[in-house]
Image (cartoon, rainbow, N blue to C red):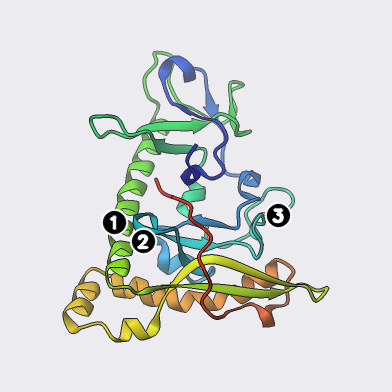
């Protein structure tokens, strides 16, 4: 599976034949996201997510996406506790949509809904919401899921336009964050990009006006302001907050193609 699916272990196309008796129980167990330290973000989330998490960019070329940092090491989400509960104030849409995902676009340009059958909440014991009724028709719950994912995909596509503009004007640069463990061991979180303030200030008035009208300038300022939250992520991860600050540019290492 493409890395855009991240923590989806066994996604299967949703169909009335395969899932006629399937129910889905969500909302309490987020342990599936415990081993990821970042997830993709859409631009529409910047205001809420940026008030709590650092927002960066990850990937290369046309596959660069906004990304939210959730942990100070590669396999740690500091916002999921040992019981699988989400402890943050805001939950990214990428996590909220689980165990559903659109994937495998057809020749007609349609995305096919998948459900991760490995998720503990997917069951045939009547727990949660049914996907299909006794006649094989879509339940209101499934229709709501489809609407949610369609809306997410539109927001993701709009976010891609934003990142393409950042790339077009060469506004992104590699960076890293450094953390010090209680033992004194130094660690680095690398492989992401941030907007270069000097290059942003050097943009011409026409470009700035365009970015202002499309809300891309607002997103950029929200991204830059959010970088102060590296300290709180480190603190949640058991790292001293004083050393949790972005530092000099580093070579990118995260090349995940994360999307809808």
Q: Are marks 2 and 1 in contact (CB under 8 Å)?
A: yes
Between 48 and 2, the residue placed more toward the observer is 2
| Mark 3 Cα-neighbour bin, 10 Å: few <14, some 14–19, many ≥20 | few
Structural distance between the alpha carbons of marks 3 and 1: 32 Å
Q: Earlier in the sequence, mark 3 or mark 1?
A: 3
Q: Are marks 2 and 3 in contact (CB under 8 Å)?
A: no
Position in image of residue 237 (x %, y %):
70, 66
Relative to 217, residue 127 above or below: above
Structural distance between the alpha carbons of marks 2 and 1: 9 Å
Q: Which mark is residue 44?
A: 2
Q: Which mark is residue 158?
A: 1
Q: Going 38% across and 77% down the picture, which residue do you hit? A: 221
Position in image of residue 72 (x %, y %):
65, 65
| Mark 1 Cα-neighbour bin, 10 Å: few <14, some 14–19, many ≥20 | some
The single residue placed furthest to the right in the displayed view is: 183
Q: Which mark is residue 81?
A: 3
């Amino acid at each position: 599976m493409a890395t855009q699916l991240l923590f989806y272990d066994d996604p299967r196309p949703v169909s009335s034949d395969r899932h006629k008796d399937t129910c889905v129980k969500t909302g309490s167990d987020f342990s599936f996201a415990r081993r990821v330290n970042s997830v993709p973000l859409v631009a529409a989330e910047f205001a809420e997510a940026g008030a709590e998490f650092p927002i960066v960019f990850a990937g290369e070329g046309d596959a660069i996406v906004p990304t939210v940092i959730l942990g100070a090491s590669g396999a740690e989400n500091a916002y999921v506790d040992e019981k699988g509960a989400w402890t943050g104030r805001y939950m990214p849409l990428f996590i909220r949509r689980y165990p559903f995902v659109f994937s495998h676009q057809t020749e007609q340009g349609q995305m096919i809904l998948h459900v991760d059958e490995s998720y503990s909440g997917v069951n045939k014991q009547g727990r949660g919401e049914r996907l299909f009724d006794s006649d094989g028709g879509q339940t209101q719950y499934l229709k709501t899921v489809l609407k949610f994912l369609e809306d997410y995909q539109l927001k993701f596509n709009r976010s891609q336009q934003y990142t393409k503009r950042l790339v077009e004007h060469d506004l992104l640069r590699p960076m890293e964050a450094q953390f010090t463990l209680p033992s004194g061991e130094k660690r680095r979180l690398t492989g992401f990009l941030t907007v270069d303030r000097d290059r942003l200030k050097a943009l011409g008035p026409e470009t700035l006006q365009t970015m202002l009208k499309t809300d891309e300038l607002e997103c950029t300022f929200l991204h830059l302001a959010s970088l102060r939250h590296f300290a709180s992520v480190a603190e949640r991860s058991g790292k001293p907050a004083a050393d949790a600050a972005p530092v000099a540019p580093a070579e990118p290492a995260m090349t995940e193609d994360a999307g809808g």
